[in-house]
Amino acid sequence: GIPKNANLDWKKGPCRFCGVGCGVLVGTENGKAVAVKGDPNSPVNKGLCCVKGYHSIMALYGKDRLTHPLVKKNGRYVKTSMDEALDLIASKMKETIAEHGKDAVSIYGSGQWTIPDGYAASKLFKGCIGTNNVEANARLCMASAVTGFLTSFGLDEPMGCYEDIDHADVFVLWGNNMAEMHPVLFSRLLDQRLKRGVKIIDFATRTTRTSTAADKSILFLPQTDLAVANAICYEIIKNGWVNNSFVEKHCSFSKGLTNMGYGLEDNYTFTDKPEKISFEDYKTFLEDYTPEKVSKLSGVSVRDIKYMASYYGDPNKKVMSLWCMGMNQHTRGTWINNLVYNIHLLTGKISQPGNSPFSLTGQPSACGTVREVGTLTHKLPHGVVMNKEHREFAAKIWGVPAENIPSKPTYHTVEMFRALDRGDIRFMWIQVTNPMVTMPKLKRYRDGAKKEGRFIVVSDVYPTPTTDIADVILPSAMWIEREGMYGNSERRTQYFEQMVDPPGEAISDTWQLIEVAKRLGYEKQFPYKEETHIEEIYTEYRKHHDNIKHNMAPLEVLKSQSGAIWPYVDGKSTKWRFNAKYDPACSNGEDFHFYGKPDGKAIIWQRPYEPAAEEPDNEYPYWLNTGRVVEHWHTGSMTRRIPVLHQAMPHAYVELHPDDAERMQIKTGDAVRLTTRRGEITLPASINERGVPAPMQVFVPFFDENILINDITLDSFCPISKEPDYKKCAVRVEKA
Ligand code: SF4
């Protein structure tokens, strides 16, 4: 609550938590953040916040905040000074490189890194040290969206923006519990229903708060979304709903590899080599996906498949498709992203206000820091390490020889932790993330990280299961205790200033990296001053994006407005890319120009249905699905310190269908044992109306560090994006 009669100093910034990127106003008094409210001038949330946003400032003041560096000595953590801790980190890095080579050191960050944090990490590791061992947890949540965009359009990130919501007539949510994961954005959909009577269709494997609020809930069996999307395309073609002139002018057809495996033990491969096909070939392929055939496989009625297709096919209806983890955390994550684009491309419903395929991100800067700065092994701030020109361009700005940047990617996230387990990586610095809760098949990677001869540094704001494996723990300044920028789901970059002091010796992750860089001898590349380093880094970072297709707004613009959507051209945000009416980069004289592809055409991909990596059988008869809840931010390391949120959702649970629960005589609160091929855990049952899974499926949220569901999940991943599938594996369910 806002203290009565308070004379507060209000400052604006983006919310700390999810990828919606709501604008908030933070009230400070006597050096402390004491109130928070939605910014009525923010075009994102227009004054609203969700429960996490309204309580966000309380996450700064948990009793067990990390305030001083800690070094592990004889199995115990001992307080040390920041200088000593940074010296130790730099000397360990030097020692590791000398003994084991550059690729033995690594950094693992996050979509919660600010833009300057990620930029400093990439510059230090890729540019100065000369290793591509840079990854971020966004690999676990939106890598399939990236490869979906790249394979279909050649350029990453949604072409539309949140304003699409104000124009669309129909919203199709693909495996997307938006009411809990993107609550403020979902409230904008509900608002449009009140105002204009729009339709909301929830297409998912379980019912949730979203399905309860939707006009129609359609359930499908796990993994069969691939087949249903193809059936929708089949219906669109059969009924003559194809926008022929759009397809002829702006699309081409391709097929890619099949039977690519599930990444259970492989090395880095990125390409899905395309082979051109004709529209006729594509139509023949779709003959296997009639609604009748797909209905048997997916459990979706023929009527419901036709119902969804009819909205996409209706020329008088504008359709927005929205998705997040349900499609991205999928062993065929890239393909299912491609398939939803196929629907929009066939009907020409793309890149126009209200006609918009839109992948949402979970974290506040998954787009800004991971996708735009490029904090993944194969990426550079603008381009990829495999491209000589891109390496030369980045090296020039970084002030390093181009040969410093290796031309081959090293390890994607799962493979990076496998390398730590094997001993190929000996030093890992983990910032703003909690992999010892979030890695799939967690026990293997936890055991690997604890092996002799590994040196782990963890920068965070609270103790977590990941700080438990650290040799050095650095206390980080959090959110408004430092200055920074985040990039949200609609390509909007937003700035926040430092509003309060961090506790104890805590400093920002950016400054930690700069201090270590200097100790490693890179003073020339890291000449930034403490008072101005964020501004200096952002100005330097903008040089990487200095072109009409990707330009970032100047800092003055970010400071004076509620951020800006890139490409920022001639003093304006580009709200719809690839549409010549809105996007100045469209240069071929056509109404649409998919300039990410050499021929300017988007690709309609032939992508078949393939079964999941592990399916229920007699021994493990249920599907296990994992995810989030509205009360907690990711692993709960911050929100579990907010009393009201912790009380509302104190621990994890297994959500059972009432029929399954009755058969096993399990009641809410009873202890249930879940067993997979990776191990077992015991946790309380929840049988309520809030989330009723389809029969033979159980759901467990992953926020609870005392009930580590990822100890038993499977580390299979999409072979193109390398994103693991946290939504599907086989599990046995028993009363404990
Ligand atoms: Fe923050 Fe996301 Fe909630 Fe908005 S919807 S207030 S960004 S957590």
Image (cartoon, grey):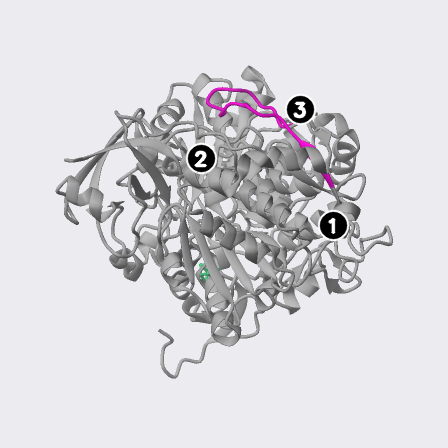
- Give the total number of marks visible in the rendering: 3
Q: Identify the main secondary structure in magenta.
A: loop
What type is the residue that disc 2 sits on?
A: Asp
Closer-to-camera residue (367/420): 367
Closer-to-camera residue (248/420): 248
Residue 467, given in percent of the width and then of the height, sits at 37, 37
| Residue matched to label 2 | 725
| Residue matched to label 1 | 244
Magenta residues, start to end: 252-271
Residue 686, given in percent of the width and then of the height, sits at 22, 49
Please check the rendered image and state whether residue 262 is part of the magenta-colored stretch, yes or no.
yes
| Residue matched to label 3 | 408
Q: CA distance from mark 1 to mark 2?
A: 36 Å
Q: Earlier in the sequence, mark 1 or mark 2?
A: 1
Q: Callout 1: few (<14), some (14-19), or many (20+) C-alpha neighbours within 10 Å?
A: few
What type is the residue that disc 1 sits on?
A: Asn
Please name which of the two marks, 3 or 2, marks the residue nearer to the observer: 2
436 sits to left or right of 529? left
- Residue at 45% x, 17% y is 422
